[in-house]
Image: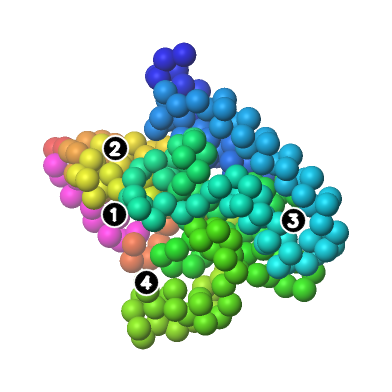
Amino acid sequence: MDASFIAAEARAALDAAGQLPDAELDLAAIALQFARIDAPEADAAAAAAHLSEIARQAVAMAVEDPAADAGDAPRRAAVLAELLHSRLGYEGDQQTYDDPANANLIRVIERRRGLPVALGLLWLHAAEAAGWEAHGLDFPGHFLLGVAGTRGMVVVDPFHGGLILEAPALRALLKQFEGEQAELRPGLLAGLGKRLVLIRLQNNIKLRRLRAGNMQGALTCTEDILRLAPADAMMWRDAAIMNQRLDRIGAALACLEHFLALVPEGEAAERARALANELRQRLN
């Protein structure tokens, strides 16, 4: 199977996923499609088989731990850490953090190393298989998980083996990203939907390509994100700006039209209209 066929097949799957409500998205399966586009030579079938094995073991371990299955959130976090960190060897890649492989699910599975969001996605996959509630958290700079139970939620760091973070550790982590003046505030532990978790994963690839000066690669990544998230206005704006910088004026205008259909009013809309007018003048 050649690379172009694999990419086309994967993009068709993303297009289909883009029409689904958030609750029906299969996180790991969609992340696998993104990974196939970026690494068509990799063994996606082996990765899919491994994801099935993670799910099977998660179900078995849930049955074997009555306290976790009854709703003890710390026990649930401990079971997931036992499976993914202790048994399967998943760890955060602290040595080559910026390696693009750390955001490609197939490579993460092969290497057992990855970024926080890539590892967190595997945790969410296992938790869902076990029938336990878990979700990504909108914490700045470092992807965290909330593992829920009958008495509330524990905050887990998948990058560090499933470490449970209490308020002092969360405050210290926040200060690393926002400075010493930062303090915990409402909304930092708000849950992320599945689509937003996948966007956060792919944004790592997009930003690394931008830093490397690979504008075309960043645009391609953005266009693939939009297959999954066609209602993401900011992603349409980003695509417009990248197309503009690549001197693709018609494509930039089309992206701005999508943005304005989603955000017709406000300051951002006015800026978009001004840019669209400027681009139209360049076409004349």
Label 4: how many Cα within 10 Å (few below 14, some 14–19, many 20+): few
* Drawn side of residue 69 relative to residue 95, left or right: right
Rounded to the nearest angstrom, the CA distance separating label 4 from label 3 is: 30 Å
Pick the residue in front: 179 or 241: 179
Q: Earlier in the sequence, mark 2 or mark 1?
A: 2
Part of the protein shown in magenta: 269-282
Q: Amino acid at mark 2?
A: Gly
Q: Earlier in the sequence, mark 3 or mark 1?
A: 3
- The image quadrant where one finds the C terminus is top left
Label 1: how many Cα within 10 Å (few below 14, some 14–19, many 20+): some
Q: Which residue is mark 2?
A: 217
Rounded to the nearest angstrom, the CA distance separating label 4 from label 1 is: 34 Å
Q: Residue at x 68, y 70 (%)?
A: 153
Residue 270 painted magenta:
yes
Pick the residue in front: 113 or 233: 113
Q: Which residue is mark 4?
A: 177
Q: From the viewer's perspective, is the residue at label 3 or at label 2 nearer? A: 3
Residue 79 painted magenta:
no
Can I make out residue 7 in this image?
no
Q: Amino acid at mark 1?
A: Arg
Q: Earlier in the sequence, mark 4 or mark 1?
A: 4
Q: Which residue is mark 3?
A: 132
Q: Can you give x and y, in whole percent of width and height, for residue 22 in the image? A: 62, 49
Dot 4: element: helix
* Drawn side of residue 110 relative to residue 17, left or right: left
Q: Earlier in the sequence, mark 3 or mark 2?
A: 3
**Residue reaching furthest top?**
1
Q: Can you give x and y, in whole percent of width and height, for residue 13 in the image? A: 55, 30
Please give the label number shown on residue 273. 1
Residue 41 against residue 206 in the figure, above or below: above
